[in-house]
Image (tube, helix red, strand yellow):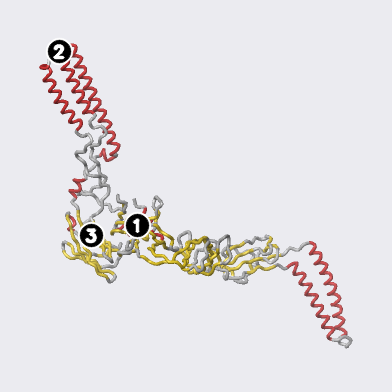
Amino acid sequence: MLTHIAAPLRAAVVMLALFAGSAYAHEGHDHDAAPPPVSRTIAPRGEALSEAFALVVIARDGALTFYLDCFQSGEPIPSASLDVEAPTGPVTATAAADGSYRLPAPWLGKPGHFDLMVTVTANGVTDVLPVDITVPDPAATTAATPPASPVSSASPAIVDGIKDRFASQDKGLIAGTAGGFLLGVVAMALARGRRRAPVVALLAFTVTLALGAAAFAHGDKDHGAPQTNAALTPQGGIAPTDLAQRLPDGSVFVPKPTQRLLGLRTVMTSVGTFRRTVGLPGRVTPNPNASGVVQSSVGGRLSPPPSGLFPRLGTPVKKGDVLAFVTPPVQRVDMSDMRQRQGELDQQMAIVQRRVERYQKLVTSGAVSQVQLEEASDELKGLKDRRTALDKIRLEAEALVAPVDGLVAEANAVAGQMATPGQMVFQIVDPGSLWVEALSFDALATAQDATARLADGRTLNLAYQGSGLADRNQAIPVQFAIKGDVTGLRVGQFVTVQAGTDSEQQGLALPRSSVVRSGNGQDIVYEHTTAERYEARQVRVEPLDGNRVLVAAGLGVGKRVVTQGAELLDQVR
């Protein structure tokens, strides 16, 4: 019995070993790892930094482009002299219209490492900056980055999933077919004879195990080489794309052309001594010495001035201009008394008039003295004046005049409106003389170096005028005069006042535009570490004045911090 099955058993063991090896060769291992995909590339470049200059050299299209900036501020330097020691000899770069400098370099056509020595002369300063540039081999780059196939480049994830699914289905189908075939062979052998049945059954069982293991050996594995997204040049190299991008370590790479497009500027941090400030809520108020209100002293009906139109908001007026009239109403009882008084005056005027006429006739004969005639004439004149004044009370209106020169800041006049005594009808404000009134919850002896910050970011310089001794809503009013330009301000506009106190503090002062808010709510600033690289630094800041903040922690001295364009830099992804 053993003699008959020895040879088939050895064959089965060999087949089992072969299929088992192919089935488990790739289980949990990667024997041919492909290089990581290349998504973006940049042109060959070099940089050099000194205390005065920051130089970046970019090699592109057989030429060198030089970008020269001030080291501390990052401001471009357009008028400079650049003498370059190139592999072919000394040459001078020429200025371009965009503020850069160009130099033809035909020797860049072959790959290699090139050392340059650039002598920069600008603003009376001369500096020698060594720069090295490495031009990669296009053939090596192409070999390291195989082109993507038409199928897999469309959607690698979807294509790989489809391949795995069909591969698993095909292998399962093959294994099932082979197993069914071998079962049929076993059945036939059993039908023909019982002596060969154990040998055939053993062989069928071995082959079935081998095929099943081979069918599922590559389950859930991805052995396809990853494809690249890099564009290729006609020569086979990778096309450079100088784009601003955020690097894996969180820093931001910004090419020099993009820096100039965004207008990035920096400042060197240094420790200084500043007065401690306190923030106060405030609002813009008119200068009490250059403004006024127009009120009615009596109640009456409003009527337009002689021009026929009430002055509207923003209308310039002069001191003494008539802005409106107030006609006091007369009650029926008052009208009756006035008519009775008018009748009495008319009767007295008639009696005195006849007396004057009689005295005029008798004075010539000496029967009446001249003094008596003059007294009668004066009495008649007095009665006429009283009669005229009584008529004016019924007809004459009160004129409302402007007390100062300025613009109409508030107008509450409508034709036919009834004005009450003491009601403000117009407010006149001098737009060139405005104050700020703030509320302080702590006693301030003096508020020095005060500034006011508007909602749009504008800053106003203030001069301390005084503070009140009586509380107003549990706060002390503090008044400041606005110094400088007040264009665009309006009375009642809310501001935030940063008033300096007597106590002092030390720290790093930065413009408010340097600080941006990250996605997690943390205040950050961007440090210019290299010529084309910026790194985010988490900081803790305190308000210093309307334009600056004080860095309390997170930043050291002698760092170049972005002061202009930080918000744009924070959007780079």
Q: Which mark is residue 526?
A: 1
* Horizontal relation, residue 433 to residue 182: left or right: right
Q: Which mark is residue 557?
A: none
| Residue at position x 49%, y 65% in the image | 487
The reply to whether callout 2 and callout 3 are in contact (CB within 8 Å) is no
Mark whose residue sits in front, 2 or 1: 2
Q: Which mark is residue 195?
A: 2
Q: Amino acid at mark 3?
A: Leu
Tally of marks? 3
Residue 4 placed where, x, y %?
11, 16
Q: Could you classify mark 3 by the number of other residues whose Cα lies within 10 Å: few (under 14), some (14-19), or many (20 or more)?
A: many
Q: Amino acid at mark 1?
A: Tyr
The reply to whether callout 3 and callout 1 are in contact (CB within 8 Å) is no
Quick check: 178 above or below 57? above
Q: Could you classify mark 2 by the number of other residues whose Cα lies within 10 Å: few (under 14), some (14-19), or many (20 or more)?
A: few
Quick check: 172 above or below 275? above
* Horizontal relation, residue 240 to residue 511: left or right: left
Q: CA distance from mark 2 to mark 3?
A: 88 Å
Residue 151 placed where, x, y %?
26, 38
Image quarter (top left, top right, bottom left or bottom right) of the N terminus: top left
The answer to which of marks 2 and 3 sits earlier in the sequence is 3
Which quadrant holds residue 29? top left
Residue 486 placed where, x, y %?
50, 66
In this view, the residue in front, 541 or 258, is: 541
Residue 163 placed where, x, y %?
26, 33
Mark whose residue sits in front, 2 or 3: 2
The answer to which of marks 3 and 1 sits earlier in the sequence is 3
The answer to which of marks 2 and 1 sits earlier in the sequence is 2
Q: CA distance from mark 2 to mark 1?
A: 87 Å
Q: Which mark is residue 64?
A: 3
Which quadrant holds residue 514? bottom left
In this view, the residue in front, 567 or 62, is: 567
